[in-house]
Image (cartoon, rainbow, N blue to C red):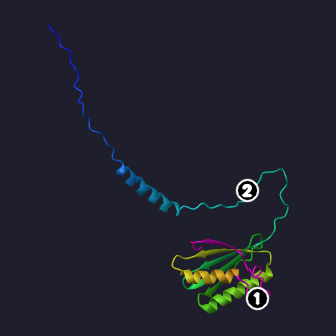
Amino acid sequence: MSRKKNKRHVPQDIPDVELNIMPFIDIFSLLNTFLLFTATFVSIGLLRVQVPFLSNATPDSKPTRSLDINVDVGRDQIVLRTAYTIAPTDKTSNSFSSSPDGIAAFHRALIDLKHRNPRDDKVTLYSDEDVSYHKLVEVLDAIKIDDSIDTSDGVTDNNKLYPKVVMGSVLL
């Protein structure tokens, strides 16, 4: 029995193997473009939050009385609701039309509230979903800007009626 050695047949002229990387370049260029476009929509916002601390200090024995002001903006009317935080609450509710005269009367009512309660500076604003943007901006201007303060000296930072406005989208 004769055994023959099996020799591997190795071709002498192996063709050069090419790796086609063009599809990879196309895919990565598309991914980079998509990444750059979507990165502009992602924004990083910083919120400064006052964190309450636990301490052994006794709380103030007498809490201060402040005025809660709620403004409900609908398509046809603006409702101004006020109530004090500590009894007697003295809840009031006034309704104004959404016409320019109604907004002016609403603004005068806010100025009167500010003169009676000068320490309060926050208004909570609720808007219905069918209120136009233009009408909402008019109401915000009536809440924030105090026309009764003289700004002829060029200083416009002091003419804020209620500088803090908290907005929501649900009518109460």
Residue 21 highlighted magenta (yes or no)? no
x then y, percent, for residue 70: 66, 75
Element under disc 1:
loop
From the image, give the main secondary structure of the stretch colored magenta: loop
Asked if residue 93 can be seen in this view, the reply is no
Check disc 1 and give the amino acid type.
Answer: Ser
Q: For label 1, count other residues whose C-alpha is less than 10 Å away and answer few (under 14), some (14-19) or many (20+).
A: few
Furthest-bottom residue in view?
101
Check disc 2 and give the amino acid type.
Answer: Val
Q: Left or right: 63 with respect to 15?
A: right
Q: Cβ–Cβ below 8 Å for labels 1 and 2?
A: no
Residue 83 figure quarter:
bottom right
Asked if residue 141 can be seen in this view, the reply is yes
Q: Label 1, label 2: how many angstroms apart (C-alpha)?
A: 36 Å
**Quadrant for the C terminus in the image:** bottom right
Residue 15 figure quarter:
top left
Furthest-front residue in view?
13
Residue 22: image tag? none
x then y, percent, for residue 27: 39, 53
Where does label 2 land, which residue? 51
**Quadrant for the N terminus in the image:** top left
Residue at image position (80%, 81%) is: 116
- Residue range corresponding to the magenta coloring: 145-172
| Count of all numbered marks drawn on residues in the image | 2
Residue nearer the viewer, 21 or 13: 13
Residue 113 figure quarter:
bottom right
x then y, percent, for residue 34: 45, 59
Q: Left or right: 57 with respect to 12?
A: right
Where does label 1 land, which residue? 148
Q: Is residue 20 above or below residue 119?
A: above
Residue nearer the viewer, 40 or 109: 40
